[in-house]
Image (tube, grey):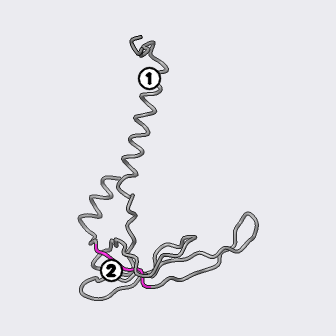
Amino acid sequence: MRNIVAHESATLNETRGTVVDSISRRDRSNTNNQQKETYAPVIEFLANGERTRFAGNYESYRSSNGQMVVVRYDPKQPISTARVVNPLEGLVPWGMFGMGGLAVVSSLGALLPVRWSSGE
């Protein structure tokens, strides 16, 4: 994950974009064949001095017009490569590392005959 972030930092530009509209689509659920409406924000940002728009990912909720988001894009192909940066994107690897460490510590506690006492 760290290599991906380092590569993106070296090759992609990051800027602020604004949600200017949203588009919707209806999808059928595989489980009960019920229609569900999803929404994608239309985001506008400046790339190479020009206003550029792209549609974000479809979600079950509609983003508010005027909402500011962080956009990452390749300056050579801004429209086809633009994506919204998730605010928690950098925390996921640390969270996985922390959960793995917690699992190791708790399993060692179960295996080792050492017991902690409160001193009473």
Check if residue 17 falls in the magenta segment: yes
Which circle's residue, 2 or 1, is located before the other in the chain? Answer: 2
User: How many other residues sit within 10 Å of disc 2, few (<14), some (14-19) or many (≥20)?
Assistant: few
Image location (x, y in percent) of residue 5: 31, 58
Question: Which one is nearer the viewer's eye here, 72 or 37?
Answer: 37
Q: Is residue 113 above or below residue 19?
A: above
The part of the image, by quadrant, that contains residue 120 is top left
Q: Which range of residues does the magenta coloring cover? A: 15-20
Check if residue 100 falls in the magenta segment: no
Q: What element carries label 1?
A: helix
Image location (x, y in percent) of residue 72: 33, 71
What residue did someone put label 2 on? 77
* Residue 108 badge: 1
Which residue appears at 38% of the width and 62% of the height?
Answer: 87
Q: Is mark 2 on a helix, strand or loop?
A: loop
Which residue appears at 24% of the width and 84% of the height?
Answer: 48
Q: In this view, does 3 lie above or below 76?
A: above
In the rendered image, the residue lying farthest to the right is 32
Q: In this view, does 7 lie above or below 1?
A: below
Which residue appears at 26% of the width and 72% of the height?
Answer: 13
How many marks can you see?
A: 2
Which residue type carries mark 2?
Answer: Gln
